[in-house]
Amino acid sequence: MMNNRSKFTLFPIFLVLYEIAIYFSNDAYLPALPTISTDLATSHHLVQLTLTLWFLGSATMQLILGPISDRYGRKPVLLIGGIIFALTCILCGLTHSITLLLVFRFIQGATITSMVIPGYAAIHEYFSHEKAIHTLALMGSITVLAPSLGPLLGVLILTVAGWRWIFFLLAFWAFLMLIVLYFKMPETNIKGYQHPIHIKKIAKNYGNIISNKIFMARLFCFCFLFGAMIAWIAAGPFLVISDFHHSSLIFAVMQVMVFGSFILCTRSLKLLMRHLQNTTLIKMGLGLAFAGASFSVLASLLFPQNLWLMVVSMMFIAAGSGLSFPLLNRMAIEASTAPMGTRMAVLSTAMSLLAVLGSGLTSWFYNGSLVSFSMILILFISIAYALNGFIYLKKHTS
């Protein structure tokens, strides 16, 4: 048994490397958005819509694939979905139509579910409470390399080969990681414990999760923080490159600053957990995020042309998110006893919906000014802060 477990020791690393390939399908092509707009002879809004449709696609399959992975296992769902993802990368690189690109991006987004639900369900099932949080923090610190280093990779590929090769290289990367995961991913949903697909039973499980106030409050606290980060990802290239006329390299440096703050806090979480309670760390994280969002509003009103102050604000929000994400994720999962795939389906659906909301609000409300962007940030962070306050009151009044 020990030898069998040692075989899967590096499973989270291989999973997160595959996850980065998936997220690079957004982040590495962010610097290429203006180029794609010119190449396909279309508007900035339609090209930006490729981000929104990617997230919308990721919201379409969760509630289906959750019970399927509970029935048929984690590995088959992940591997089949991964093959479809790699194929859509190739199609995105081949298309010369904005309409087809939008369709392929939607399908590509839908395949994200096949990684998030079975992959993270396996993490929660395979590891104990504390080990799972440490693993999620480690994976988060690696995954965040996508938005921080993705633009740098995108700039490099744009310089050497053009935007289409971003998708071709990601297809190769994904195929490679899928081959490794075929051998290195454990099947945590073992035979004898798999849940049959009964529509009434599945509906009841979803109903129990949705009616679980602590689960939903922790989940949406996590998701609204996530939505604020997505707003930066969606607005960043246009804010920095198009509106403030900085180079793609400066944009990449700003991404490293913002997401470097996230990495620093996730890597410090293991040490902090030895001295502070999980709930205290969540409060600290949300406090940092709220301070950053408040500063962004003040700075954008007083210094509307100072983009670097907005970057500092985002560094605080990213740092607070880095502290909070792994804890809120695991504590939400532990608040329910429904089948793990079903729990992950609800969590993943909520994340996708908030990503759609974050990118959609940014697309329509952001008008090129720092003030408009800061209002989106303070809205999302304030809701997350209020939800954590609800959890505190609920626990101390029950």
Image (spheres, rainbow, N blue to C red):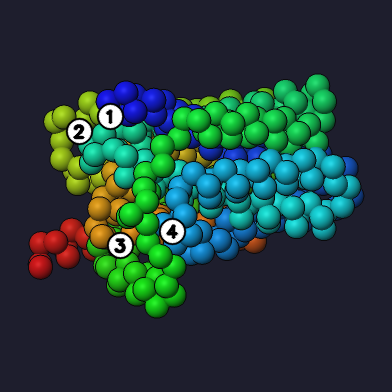
Q: Is there a contact, CB below 8 Å, between mark 2 and mark 1?
A: no
Amino acid type, residue under disc 2 in the picture = Met
As measured in the structure, the alpha-carbon distance from the residue carrying label 1 to the one carrying label 4 is 24 Å
- Give the quarter of the image for residue 269: top left
Labels 1 and 3: the sequence-earlier one? 1
- Residue 60: x and y in percent read 57, 63
Labels 4 and 2: the sequence-earlier one? 4
Labels 1 and 4: the sequence-earlier one? 1
- Give the quarter of the image for residue 21: top right
Task: Please give the label number shown on residue 273.
Answer: 2
As measured in the structure, the alpha-carbon distance from the residue carrying label 1 to the one carrying label 3 is 27 Å
Q: Residue drawn at (15%, 40%), measured in percent from left and top? A: 277
Can you tell which of label 3 and label 4 is closer to the viewer? 4
- Residue 25: x and y in percent read 65, 40
Q: Is residue 370 placed above or below 68 in the rendered structure?
A: above
Tag 4 secondary structure:
helix
Q: Nearer the viewer, residue 315 or 55?
A: 55
Q: Which residue is mark 4?
A: 71
Tag 3 secondary structure:
loop
111 left or right of 158? left
Amino acid type, residue under disc 3 in the picture = Ala
169 left or right of 291? right
Can you tell which of label 1 and label 3 is closer to the viewer? 1
- Residue 215: x and y in percent read 29, 61
Labels 2 and 3: the sequence-earlier one? 2
Task: Please give the label number shown on residue 1.
Answer: 1
Q: Which residue is mark 3?
A: 338
As measured in the structure, the alpha-carbon distance from the residue carrying label 3 to the one carrying label 4 is 13 Å
Q: Residue drawn at (58%, 40%), measured in percent from left and top? A: 23
Q: Nearer the viewer, residue 72 or 147?
A: 72
